[in-house]
Protein backbone atom coordinates (compact mmCIF):
# COMPACT_ATOMS: atom_id res chain seq x y z
CA UNK A 1 0.00 0.00 0.00
CA UNK A 2 2.81 2.44 0.79
CA UNK A 3 4.43 1.99 -2.62
CA UNK A 4 1.19 3.11 -4.28
CA UNK A 5 1.24 6.33 -2.29
CA UNK A 6 4.85 6.99 -3.32
CA UNK A 7 3.96 6.50 -6.99
CA UNK A 8 0.89 8.73 -6.73
CA UNK A 9 2.85 11.48 -4.97
CA UNK A 10 5.69 11.17 -7.50
CA UNK A 11 3.36 11.45 -10.49
CA UNK A 12 1.54 14.36 -8.88
CA UNK A 13 4.80 16.22 -8.26
CA UNK A 14 5.93 15.62 -11.85
CA UNK A 15 2.62 16.86 -13.27
CA UNK A 16 2.74 19.92 -11.02
CA UNK A 17 6.30 20.69 -12.11
CA UNK A 18 5.30 20.26 -15.77
CA UNK A 19 2.33 22.59 -15.32
CA UNK A 20 4.41 25.22 -13.51
CA UNK A 21 7.00 25.16 -16.30
CA UNK A 22 4.25 25.34 -18.91
CA UNK A 23 2.49 28.24 -17.15
CA UNK A 24 5.79 30.09 -16.85
CA UNK A 25 6.54 29.75 -20.55
CA UNK A 26 2.96 30.62 -21.53
CA UNK A 27 2.87 33.84 -19.52
CA UNK A 28 6.37 34.90 -20.58
CA UNK A 29 5.61 34.34 -24.27
CA UNK A 30 5.73 37.51 -26.33
CA UNK A 31 3.93 35.97 -29.29
CA UNK A 32 0.53 35.60 -27.61
CA UNK A 33 -2.19 38.04 -26.70
CA UNK A 34 -3.55 38.09 -23.15
CA UNK A 35 -6.54 36.06 -24.29
CA UNK A 36 -4.27 33.52 -25.95
CA UNK A 37 -2.23 33.16 -22.80
CA UNK A 38 -5.37 32.69 -20.72
CA UNK A 39 -6.74 30.10 -23.16
CA UNK A 40 -3.52 28.07 -23.14
CA UNK A 41 -3.33 28.24 -19.34
CA UNK A 42 -6.92 27.04 -18.93
CA UNK A 43 -6.41 24.30 -21.52
CA UNK A 44 -3.28 23.16 -19.70
CA UNK A 45 -5.03 23.21 -16.35
CA UNK A 46 -8.11 21.30 -17.52
CA UNK A 47 -6.06 18.63 -19.32
CA UNK A 48 -3.03 18.30 -17.02
CA UNK A 49 -0.98 16.06 -19.30
CA UNK A 50 -2.26 16.76 -22.81
CA UNK A 51 -2.40 20.55 -22.35
CA UNK A 52 1.23 21.11 -21.34
CA UNK A 53 2.49 18.65 -23.95
CA UNK A 54 0.40 20.39 -26.64
CA UNK A 55 1.80 23.76 -25.54
CA UNK A 56 5.39 22.54 -25.60
CA UNK A 57 5.03 20.80 -28.97
CA UNK A 58 2.77 23.20 -30.85
CA UNK A 59 1.90 26.37 -28.94
CA UNK A 60 5.36 27.47 -27.84
CA UNK A 61 6.81 27.06 -31.33
CA UNK A 62 3.88 28.91 -32.87
CA UNK A 63 4.12 31.75 -30.35
CA UNK A 64 7.88 32.01 -30.92
CA UNK A 65 7.34 32.27 -34.69
CA UNK A 66 4.69 34.96 -34.18
CA UNK A 67 6.98 36.95 -31.89
CA UNK A 68 9.88 36.62 -34.35
CA UNK A 69 7.78 37.88 -37.25
CA UNK A 70 6.61 40.85 -35.20
CA UNK A 71 2.97 40.48 -36.22
CA UNK A 72 1.57 40.94 -32.71
CA UNK A 73 1.24 44.41 -31.27
CA UNK A 74 2.32 44.91 -27.71
CA UNK A 75 0.77 47.52 -25.49
Image (cartoon, grey):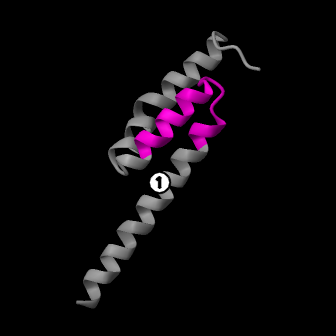
Q: In which quarter of the image is residue 55?
A: top left
Label 1 sits on a secondary structure element that is: helix
Q: Is residue 11 above or below residue 20?
A: below
Q: Residue at x 58, y 24 (%)?
A: 64
Left or right: where 36 falls relative to 73: left
Residue farthest toward the bottom in the current orientation of the protein: 2
Q: Residue at x 66, y 37 (%)?
A: 28
Q: Where is residue 57 in the image (x, y as percent from the top left)?
A: 41, 34
Residue farthest toward the right in the current orientation of the protein: 75
Q: Which residue is drawn at 43% across and 44% down?
A: 44
Q: What secondary structure is the stretch in magenta mostly built from?
A: helix
Q: Is residue 35 magenta?
A: yes
Rendered-image quadrant of the N terminus: bottom left
Q: Position of residue 2 (x, y in %)?
A: 28, 90
Q: Is residue 59 magenta?
A: no
Q: Where is residue 17 in the image (x, y as percent from the top left)?
A: 50, 59
On the image, numbered disc 1 is attached to which residue? Answer: 18
Packing grade of label 1 (10 A; few <14, some 14-19, many >=20) is some
Q: Position of residue 52 (x, y in %)?
A: 42, 44
Q: Which of 75 and 6 is in front in this view?
A: 75
Q: Quadrant of residue 32?
A: top right
Q: Give the range drawn in magenta.
A: 25-44
Count the marks: how many? 1
Left or right: where 38 falls relative to 53: right
Q: Residue at x 64, y 14 (%)?
A: 72
Rendered-image quadrant of the C terminus: top right
Amino acid sequence: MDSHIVVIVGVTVLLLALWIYTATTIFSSRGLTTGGKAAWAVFSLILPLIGPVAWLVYGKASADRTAASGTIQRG
